[in-house]
Amino acid sequence: MTNKSYVMWNNKGGVGKSTITFHIASAYAEKHPERDVIVIDMCPQANSSSMLMGGGRESEDALQYLISKPEPQTIVGYITAETLTGNADIKQFITQVATINSNLSENLYLISGDGNLELIAPLLSQRAGATPLSSSDNPWIKIHTIIKNLTEKRIDEDRPCTYFIDTNPSFAIYTQLAIVGGQELLVPVNADDSSIFAITGLFNLIWGSIDIHPVYGKYTFAEKAKDHGLSLPKISYLLGNRFTQKIGAANAFKALSDEAIGRMFTEYEDDPNKFESRGVTIRTKDDFERAYSVELRDFNSAGVVAANQGIPLSKMTQHTYEVYGMKIQVSKEQRELCKKAIDDLVAKL
Ligand SMILES: Nc1ncnc2c1ncn2[C@@H]1O[C@H](COP(=O)(O)OP(=O)(O)OP(=O)(O)O)[C@@H](O)[C@H]1O
Ligand SMILES: [Mg+2]
């Protein structure tokens, strides 16, 4: 069995990247005890790291502890070590989250997010843009494949790994590293125009636009990736997040969902090679929707409890939870619906 890697990205913020990363990574780890599951948190806000480390104040302390080590036990520590030695040991940078959050399985690991990603970003750009020393030296590729090379590593040689990479919405250099690191790209969208417009932006940023700017065009990530023959992830699923939400808004949400799927389908018709092959014939938008889109419902109070306490849906068995001193009710029926939506997605991965 080989390693797998999924990156979650949309150029629009707040669409649910970190929330979905937490839920699918925890469910995937439960369902795949034969694999080690590693979340790489490539967002300086480190939201998915917090959830994995149990949420709330304690997770802030745990995160601070990892970031403040002389050699940070975070993604910044890893990137720095790999840049300097080309041979960083993954074991020094992972955290087995079950040691901090007992709700999670033992085969789930985190390479924690770190606010200092922002600080090292200009240094990475400088290194990536350096003049090659020889014909075999390629600083741009060396920097841009740091995460891709990481996802080929294993904690234990006998156990394949599945990586889930959470990202920042900006197309900063560290986001570029994250995107290049995924074999498959998951694209969450919300039922609003701005996250749907962002789909077009996403294609332009990763693969380039048809109209290349005469001055800035050659500096883009897309052009450089083409020049260097860098392989890019295949689009795996469009995740309509919180589409099943307000009773009565069904028609409005359907219209937005149709628009999002229509945009993706246009891109598919233009170049199916940008998409993961599903081995089925795709002729119509409906075929495309069945093969490449998944709807995730609004988690409501279950989502609040999960984020605040780092509890995956499979372990949320109580009826009432306390969040910042307030009692919150999670109905069994609602939790089961959310769990099914996540499990269905995980079964497709
Ligand atoms: N399916 C869902 N049901 C209920 N709430 C959700 C759902 N998905 C996301 N949320 C909520 O929406 C907000 C944004 O989600 P999240 O932080 O995961 O987005 P993001 O894309 O990671 O944001 P950013 O771009 O800032 O990294 C959070 O408050 C989260 O709890
Ligand atoms: Mg996030």
Image (spheres, helix red, strand yellow):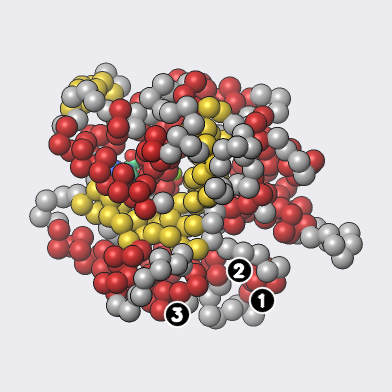
Q: Is residue 142 left or right of residue 337?
A: right
Q: Is residue 16 above or below residue 283?
A: above
Residue labelled with disc 2:
222
Residue labelled with disc 3:
270
In the image, 30 versus 308, the foreground residue is 30
Image point (43%, 60%), residue name: 236
For the residues carrying marks 3 and 2, which lies nearer the camera in this image? Answer: 3
Distance from Cα at disc 3 to Cα at disc 1? 26 Å
- Please, what is the three-letter code of the amino acid marked with disc 2? Ala
Residue 136 appearing in the image: yes
SS for callout 3: helix
- Is ligand 1 within 8 Å of the beta carbon of the residue shown at mark 1? no
Q: Earlier in the sequence, mark 3 or mark 1?
A: 1
Evaluate if marks 3 and 1 touch, with contact meaning CB atoms under 8 Å apart. no
Q: Quadrant of residue 91?
A: top right
Evaluate if marks 3 and 2 touch, with contact meaning CB atoms under 8 Å apart. no
Q: Is residue 16 left or right of residue 271?
A: left
Residue labelled with disc 1:
215
Residue 116 appearing in the image: no
Q: Residues within 10 Å of mark 3 (few under 14, many from 20)?
A: few
Which quarter of the frame holds ligand 1? top left
Q: Is residue 23 left or right of residue 334?
A: right
Locate residue 65, reporting x and y percent.
58, 22
Q: Residues within 10 Å of mark 2 (few under 14, many from 20)?
A: many
Distance from Cα at disc 1 to Cα at disc 2? 14 Å
In the image, 33 versus 38, the foreground residue is 33
- Is ligand 1 within 8 Å of the beta carbon of the residue shown at mark 3? no
